[in-house]
Protein backbone atom coordinates (compact mmCIF):
# COMPACT_ATOMS: atom_id res chain seq x y z
CA UNK A 1 0.00 0.00 0.00
CA UNK A 2 1.71 3.15 -1.28
CA UNK A 3 0.49 6.24 0.61
CA UNK A 4 1.24 9.90 -0.06
CA UNK A 5 1.25 11.82 3.24
CA UNK A 6 0.66 15.57 3.45
CA UNK A 7 1.29 17.70 6.55
CA UNK A 8 0.62 21.46 6.76
CA UNK A 9 -0.72 21.92 10.29
CA UNK A 10 1.81 24.50 11.43
CA UNK A 11 4.87 26.04 9.78
CA UNK A 12 6.30 23.06 7.92
CA UNK A 13 5.06 22.11 4.46
CA UNK A 14 5.72 18.39 4.22
CA UNK A 15 5.00 15.50 1.85
CA UNK A 16 6.17 11.91 2.02
CA UNK A 17 5.69 8.59 0.24
CA UNK A 18 5.54 5.57 2.57
CA UNK A 19 5.10 1.91 1.65
CA UNK A 20 3.04 -0.27 4.03
CA UNK A 21 3.47 2.13 6.95
CA UNK A 22 7.11 1.07 7.26
CA UNK A 23 9.34 2.03 4.39
CA UNK A 24 9.88 5.76 3.90
CA UNK A 25 10.56 6.28 0.18
CA UNK A 26 10.77 10.06 0.53
CA UNK A 27 10.27 12.63 3.30
CA UNK A 28 10.32 16.25 2.12
CA UNK A 29 10.06 18.99 4.73
CA UNK A 30 10.12 22.65 3.81
CA UNK A 31 10.43 24.72 6.96
CA UNK A 32 9.18 28.31 7.07
CA UNK A 33 11.46 29.17 10.01
CA UNK A 34 13.08 32.02 8.06
CA UNK A 35 9.68 33.65 7.41
CA UNK A 36 8.67 33.62 11.09
CA UNK A 37 12.09 34.12 12.72
CA UNK A 38 11.90 37.90 12.85
CA UNK A 39 8.59 37.72 14.75
CA UNK A 40 9.95 35.22 17.32
CA UNK A 41 7.00 32.89 16.70
CA UNK A 42 4.62 31.65 14.04
CA UNK A 43 2.37 34.17 12.29
CA UNK A 44 -0.70 32.17 11.09
CA UNK A 45 -1.43 34.40 8.05
CA UNK A 46 2.13 34.07 6.78
CA UNK A 47 2.11 30.31 7.41
CA UNK A 48 -0.96 29.62 5.27
CA UNK A 49 0.28 31.82 2.43
CA UNK A 50 3.64 30.01 2.42
CA UNK A 51 1.90 26.60 2.33
CA UNK A 52 -0.12 27.63 -0.73
CA UNK A 53 3.03 28.72 -2.57
CA UNK A 54 5.04 25.56 -1.98
CA UNK A 55 2.64 22.65 -1.43
CA UNK A 56 2.55 21.49 -5.08
CA UNK A 57 6.36 21.59 -5.60
CA UNK A 58 6.84 19.81 -2.24
CA UNK A 59 4.48 16.99 -3.30
CA UNK A 60 6.17 16.77 -6.70
CA UNK A 61 9.54 16.50 -5.01
CA UNK A 62 8.25 13.76 -2.67
CA UNK A 63 7.06 11.73 -5.67
CA UNK A 64 10.29 12.32 -7.57
CA UNK A 65 12.57 11.43 -4.61
CA UNK A 66 10.38 8.39 -3.89
CA UNK A 67 10.74 7.35 -7.54
CA UNK A 68 6.98 6.92 -7.93
CA UNK A 69 4.36 8.61 -10.08
CA UNK A 70 1.02 9.94 -8.87
CA UNK A 71 -0.60 7.08 -10.82
CA UNK A 72 1.11 4.55 -8.54
CA UNK A 73 -0.11 6.21 -5.29
CA UNK A 74 -2.91 4.14 -3.69
CA UNK A 75 -4.07 6.50 -0.94
CA UNK A 76 -3.66 10.11 0.27
CA UNK A 77 -3.23 10.92 3.96
CA UNK A 78 -3.53 14.41 5.38
CA UNK A 79 -3.39 16.05 8.81
CA UNK A 80 -6.87 17.32 9.74
CA UNK A 81 -5.92 18.73 13.18
CA UNK A 82 -4.91 19.95 15.63
CA UNK A 83 -3.24 22.99 14.11
CA UNK A 84 -3.77 26.38 12.53
CA UNK A 85 -6.98 26.35 10.55
CA UNK A 86 -5.62 28.30 7.56
CA UNK A 87 -2.59 26.03 7.36
CA UNK A 88 -4.56 22.79 7.75
CA UNK A 89 -6.95 23.84 4.98
CA UNK A 90 -4.18 24.04 2.40
CA UNK A 91 -3.11 20.42 2.89
CA UNK A 92 -6.69 19.17 3.18
CA UNK A 93 -7.77 20.89 -0.06
CA UNK A 94 -4.86 19.46 -2.02
CA UNK A 95 -5.34 15.97 -0.54
CA UNK A 96 -9.05 15.97 -1.38
CA UNK A 97 -8.32 17.13 -4.94
CA UNK A 98 -5.80 14.30 -5.47
CA UNK A 99 -8.10 11.66 -3.91
CA UNK A 100 -11.05 12.83 -6.05
CA UNK A 101 -9.10 13.16 -9.31
CA UNK A 102 -7.37 9.79 -8.96
CA UNK A 103 -10.28 7.93 -7.35
CA UNK A 104 -8.14 6.77 -4.41
CA UNK A 105 -9.00 6.72 -0.66
CA UNK A 106 -8.46 9.76 1.56
CA UNK A 107 -7.29 9.38 5.18
CA UNK A 108 -7.76 12.17 7.75
CA UNK A 109 -5.04 11.92 10.39
CA UNK A 110 -4.69 13.42 13.88
CA UNK A 111 -1.32 15.19 13.99
CA UNK A 112 -0.66 13.98 17.56
CA UNK A 113 -1.26 10.37 16.58
CA UNK A 114 1.25 10.98 13.80
CA UNK A 115 3.88 12.09 16.33
CA UNK A 116 3.26 8.94 18.40
CA UNK A 117 3.62 6.77 15.29
CA UNK A 118 6.98 8.33 14.33
CA UNK A 119 9.06 5.99 16.52
CA UNK A 120 7.49 2.95 14.78
CA UNK A 121 9.66 3.43 11.72
CA UNK A 122 12.67 2.13 13.64
CA UNK A 123 11.12 -0.86 15.40
CA UNK A 124 7.62 -1.35 16.74
CA UNK A 125 7.20 -0.13 20.33
CA UNK A 126 5.52 -2.62 22.64
CA UNK A 127 1.91 -1.76 23.55
CA UNK A 128 0.23 -0.89 25.88
CA UNK A 129 2.52 2.05 26.55
CA UNK A 130 2.65 5.51 28.08
CA UNK A 131 3.02 8.22 25.43
CA UNK A 132 4.55 11.63 26.07
CA UNK A 133 3.94 14.13 23.27
CA UNK A 134 5.98 17.30 23.70
CA UNK A 135 6.01 19.87 20.93
CA UNK A 136 5.63 23.57 20.22
CA UNK A 137 1.87 23.35 20.68
CA UNK A 138 1.40 20.29 22.92
CA UNK A 139 2.40 18.59 26.15
CA UNK A 140 0.27 15.52 26.59
CA UNK A 141 0.69 12.37 28.64
CA UNK A 142 -1.39 9.42 27.40
CA UNK A 143 -2.09 5.80 28.07
CA UNK A 144 -1.91 3.99 24.71
CA UNK A 145 -3.78 0.70 24.75
CA UNK A 146 -3.21 0.27 21.03
CA UNK A 147 -2.94 2.65 18.09
CA UNK A 148 -6.33 4.36 17.83
CA UNK A 149 -7.18 3.79 21.53
CA UNK A 150 -5.87 6.50 23.86
CA UNK A 151 -6.66 7.81 27.31
CA UNK A 152 -5.49 11.32 28.14
CA UNK A 153 -3.82 11.34 31.56
CA UNK A 154 -2.49 14.86 31.76
CA UNK A 155 -1.56 17.93 29.79
CA UNK A 156 -0.15 21.40 30.19
CA UNK A 157 -2.35 23.95 31.91
CA UNK A 158 -0.66 26.85 30.06
CA UNK A 159 2.36 26.90 27.72
CA UNK A 160 3.51 23.81 25.84
CA UNK A 161 7.03 22.52 26.63
CA UNK A 162 8.39 23.62 23.23
CA UNK A 163 6.68 26.97 23.59
CA UNK A 164 8.55 27.51 26.89
CA UNK A 165 11.87 26.80 25.12
CA UNK A 166 10.89 29.21 22.30
CA UNK A 167 9.74 32.00 24.65
CA UNK A 168 12.87 31.89 26.80
CA UNK A 169 15.10 31.91 23.72
CA UNK A 170 13.14 34.87 22.40
CA UNK A 171 13.46 36.75 25.70
CA UNK A 172 17.21 36.09 25.75
CA UNK A 173 17.58 36.99 22.04
CA UNK A 174 19.08 33.57 21.33
CA UNK A 175 17.06 32.92 18.15
CA UNK A 176 14.13 30.84 16.92
CA UNK A 177 13.13 28.04 17.35
CA UNK A 178 14.52 28.04 20.87
CA UNK A 179 14.59 24.29 21.59
CA UNK A 180 17.64 23.26 19.55
CA UNK A 181 19.53 26.45 20.55
CA UNK A 182 18.95 25.89 24.29
CA UNK A 183 19.78 22.17 23.91
CA UNK A 184 23.14 23.14 22.38
CA UNK A 185 23.93 25.90 24.93
CA UNK A 186 22.94 23.64 27.84
CA UNK A 187 25.55 21.05 26.84
CA UNK A 188 28.22 23.52 27.98
CA UNK A 189 26.39 24.60 31.15
CA UNK A 190 25.82 23.37 34.69
CA UNK A 191 22.16 22.37 35.30
CA UNK A 192 22.56 22.79 39.05
CA UNK A 193 23.54 26.47 38.95
CA UNK A 194 20.00 27.77 39.56
CA UNK A 195 17.17 25.81 41.17
CA UNK A 196 14.10 26.81 39.17
CA UNK A 197 10.61 25.67 40.24
CA UNK A 198 9.59 22.36 38.72
CA UNK A 199 7.04 22.64 35.92
CA UNK A 200 4.37 20.55 37.61
CA UNK A 201 0.92 21.12 39.07
CA UNK A 202 0.57 19.97 42.66
CA UNK A 203 -3.08 18.92 42.57
CA UNK A 204 -3.35 17.82 38.94
CA UNK A 205 -1.90 14.32 39.05
CA UNK A 206 -0.36 14.25 35.58
CA UNK A 207 -0.69 17.90 34.55
CA UNK A 208 2.15 20.29 33.76
CA UNK A 209 2.59 24.04 33.95
CA UNK A 210 5.43 25.92 32.31
CA UNK A 211 4.44 29.56 32.63
CA UNK A 212 5.61 29.93 36.27
CA UNK A 213 9.00 28.55 35.28
CA UNK A 214 9.18 31.01 32.39
CA UNK A 215 8.41 33.97 34.71
CA UNK A 216 10.94 32.73 37.22
CA UNK A 217 13.68 32.59 34.54
CA UNK A 218 12.82 36.09 33.32
CA UNK A 219 12.85 37.51 36.87
CA UNK A 220 16.16 35.82 37.61
CA UNK A 221 17.80 37.36 34.55
CA UNK A 222 16.39 40.81 35.37
CA UNK A 223 17.80 40.52 38.93
CA UNK A 224 21.21 39.30 37.85
CA UNK A 225 22.46 39.71 34.31
CA UNK A 226 25.84 38.16 35.16
CA UNK A 227 24.59 34.54 34.96
CA UNK A 228 26.44 32.55 32.30
CA UNK A 229 24.09 31.90 29.38
CA UNK A 230 25.12 28.23 29.28
CA UNK A 231 24.27 27.76 32.98
CA UNK A 232 20.93 29.51 32.59
CA UNK A 233 20.03 27.35 29.58
CA UNK A 234 21.08 24.16 31.40
CA UNK A 235 19.18 25.04 34.62
CA UNK A 236 16.01 25.99 32.73
CA UNK A 237 16.19 22.83 30.60
CA UNK A 238 16.72 20.73 33.72
CA UNK A 239 13.50 22.10 35.28
CA UNK A 240 11.52 21.05 32.19
CA UNK A 241 13.22 17.69 31.69
CA UNK A 242 12.87 16.64 35.34
CA UNK A 243 9.13 17.46 35.40
CA UNK A 244 8.47 15.57 32.16
CA UNK A 245 10.51 12.59 33.29
CA UNK A 246 9.01 12.41 36.79
CA UNK A 247 5.38 12.34 35.58
CA UNK A 248 6.04 9.99 32.70
CA UNK A 249 7.78 7.41 34.89
CA UNK A 250 5.06 7.76 37.53
CA UNK A 251 2.40 7.03 34.88
CA UNK A 252 4.33 4.08 33.47
CA UNK A 253 4.69 2.53 36.93
CA UNK A 254 1.10 3.14 37.91
CA UNK A 255 -0.27 1.66 34.66
CA UNK A 256 2.23 -1.19 34.79
CA UNK A 257 3.42 -0.76 31.19
CA UNK A 258 6.72 -2.02 29.86
CA UNK A 259 7.13 0.70 27.30
CA UNK A 260 7.19 4.51 26.93
CA UNK A 261 6.88 6.35 23.63
CA UNK A 262 8.41 9.84 23.49
CA UNK A 263 7.22 12.03 20.61
CA UNK A 264 7.06 15.56 19.18
CA UNK A 265 9.63 18.26 18.47
CA UNK A 266 10.92 18.40 22.06
CA UNK A 267 11.61 14.62 21.88
CA UNK A 268 14.73 15.75 19.97
CA UNK A 269 16.08 17.25 23.21
CA UNK A 270 19.26 15.42 24.17
CA UNK A 271 18.85 15.88 27.94
CA UNK A 272 15.25 14.62 27.86
CA UNK A 273 16.21 11.56 25.79
CA UNK A 274 19.06 10.72 28.18
CA UNK A 275 17.24 11.31 31.46
CA UNK A 276 14.06 9.51 30.44
CA UNK A 277 16.07 6.62 29.07
CA UNK A 278 18.14 6.17 32.21
CA UNK A 279 15.11 6.52 34.53
CA UNK A 280 13.05 4.10 32.41
CA UNK A 281 15.83 1.52 32.39
CA UNK A 282 15.96 1.60 36.23
CA UNK A 283 12.44 0.16 36.15
CA UNK A 284 13.09 -2.13 33.16
CA UNK A 285 10.84 -0.02 30.97
CA UNK A 286 11.75 0.32 27.30
CA UNK A 287 11.86 3.85 25.85
CA UNK A 288 11.20 4.48 22.14
CA UNK A 289 11.78 7.79 20.42
CA UNK A 290 12.05 8.75 16.76
CA UNK A 291 15.29 9.61 15.00
CA UNK A 292 15.85 13.40 15.13
CA UNK A 293 14.41 14.22 11.64
CA UNK A 294 11.21 12.35 12.53
CA UNK A 295 10.72 14.15 15.89
CA UNK A 296 9.64 17.45 14.39
CA UNK A 297 6.71 17.84 12.00
CA UNK A 298 6.86 15.58 8.95
CA UNK A 299 4.46 13.81 6.60
CA UNK A 300 5.92 10.28 6.89
CA UNK A 301 4.28 9.93 10.31
CA UNK A 302 0.94 10.97 8.78
CA UNK A 303 1.23 8.36 6.00
CA UNK A 304 2.19 5.80 8.68
CA UNK A 305 -1.00 6.33 10.70
CA UNK A 306 -3.04 6.21 7.47
CA UNK A 307 -1.70 2.71 6.78
CA UNK A 308 -3.20 1.53 10.11
CA UNK A 309 -6.48 3.25 9.17
CA UNK A 310 -6.46 1.50 5.79
CA UNK A 311 -5.99 -1.88 7.49
CA UNK A 312 -8.97 -1.12 9.77
CA UNK A 313 -11.11 0.03 6.82
CA UNK A 314 -11.27 3.64 8.02
CA UNK A 315 -11.64 6.25 5.25
CA UNK A 316 -12.26 10.02 5.29
CA UNK A 317 -14.98 11.54 3.13
CA UNK A 318 -14.36 14.27 0.56
CA UNK A 319 -16.35 16.56 2.89
CA UNK A 320 -13.69 16.23 5.62
CA UNK A 321 -12.94 19.54 7.31
CA UNK A 322 -10.09 20.95 9.40
CA UNK A 323 -10.47 20.47 13.17
CA UNK A 324 -8.06 23.03 14.73
CA UNK A 325 -8.58 21.79 18.30
CA UNK A 326 -8.75 18.06 17.55
CA UNK A 327 -7.95 16.02 20.69
CA UNK A 328 -6.40 12.63 21.27
CA UNK A 329 -8.02 10.43 23.92
CA UNK A 330 -9.94 13.36 25.42
O1 LIG B 1 6.57 18.91 16.68
P1 LIG B 1 7.06 20.23 16.23
O2 LIG B 1 7.92 20.30 14.99
O3 LIG B 1 5.88 21.21 15.95
C1 LIG B 1 4.70 21.23 16.67
O4 LIG B 1 3.81 20.38 16.39
O5 LIG B 1 4.65 22.10 17.57
O6 LIG B 1 7.82 20.88 17.48
C2 LIG B 1 8.47 22.12 17.40
C3 LIG B 1 8.98 22.46 18.79
C4 LIG B 1 9.54 23.87 18.91
O7 LIG B 1 8.98 24.50 20.04
C5 LIG B 1 11.04 23.62 19.11
O8 LIG B 1 11.68 24.62 19.89
C6 LIG B 1 11.04 22.29 19.81
O9 LIG B 1 10.02 21.55 19.18
N1 LIG B 1 12.34 21.57 19.67
C7 LIG B 1 13.14 21.30 20.71
C8 LIG B 1 14.31 20.67 20.18
N2 LIG B 1 14.15 20.58 18.82
C9 LIG B 1 12.93 21.14 18.53
N3 LIG B 1 12.99 21.52 22.04
C10 LIG B 1 13.99 21.15 22.86
N4 LIG B 1 15.14 20.57 22.42
C11 LIG B 1 15.35 20.31 21.10
N5 LIG B 1 16.48 19.73 20.69
ZN1 LIG C 1 3.92 18.61 15.65
Image (cartoon, rainbow, N blue to C red):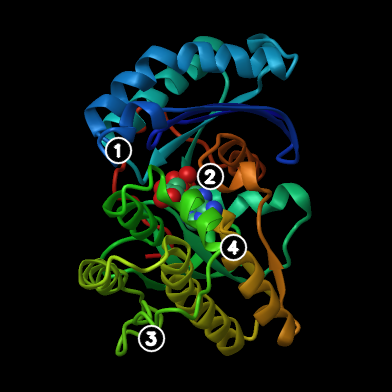
Question: Which is closer to the viewer, label 2 or label 3?
Answer: 2
CA gap, disc 2 and disc 1: 15 Å
Q: Is residue 85 visible?
A: yes
Residue, x 60% and y 42% (percent of image)? 301
Residue beneath disc 2? 296
* Percent position of residue 258, x then y: 71, 78
Q: Name the residue that disc number 3 marks.
A: 205
Residue found at x 33% / y 68%: 156
For label 1, the residue is: 42
Left or right of 224 on screen, residue 310: right
Image height of 172 relative to 222, above or below: above
Residue 248: give its label.
Answer: none
Kindly state the secondary structure of the residue where label 2 is placed: loop
**Mark found first going from the N terminus, 2 or 4:** 4
- What residue is pinned by disc 4? 262
Compared to 290, does 194 lie above or below?
below
The first of marks 1 and 4 along the sequence is 1
Which of the two labelled residues, at mark 1 and mark 3, occupies the earlier sequence position? 1
Between 326 and 238, which is closer to the camera in this rendering?
Answer: 238
Amino acid sequence: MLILGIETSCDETAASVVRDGEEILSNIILSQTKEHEKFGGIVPEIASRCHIEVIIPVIEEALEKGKVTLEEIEGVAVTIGPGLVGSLLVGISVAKAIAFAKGIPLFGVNHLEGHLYASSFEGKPKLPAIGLIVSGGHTELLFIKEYGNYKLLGRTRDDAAGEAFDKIARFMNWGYPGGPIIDELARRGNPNTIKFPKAIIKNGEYDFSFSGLKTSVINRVKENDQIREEDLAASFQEAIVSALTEKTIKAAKSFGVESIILAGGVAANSALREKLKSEASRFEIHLSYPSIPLCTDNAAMIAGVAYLMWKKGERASLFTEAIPNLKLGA
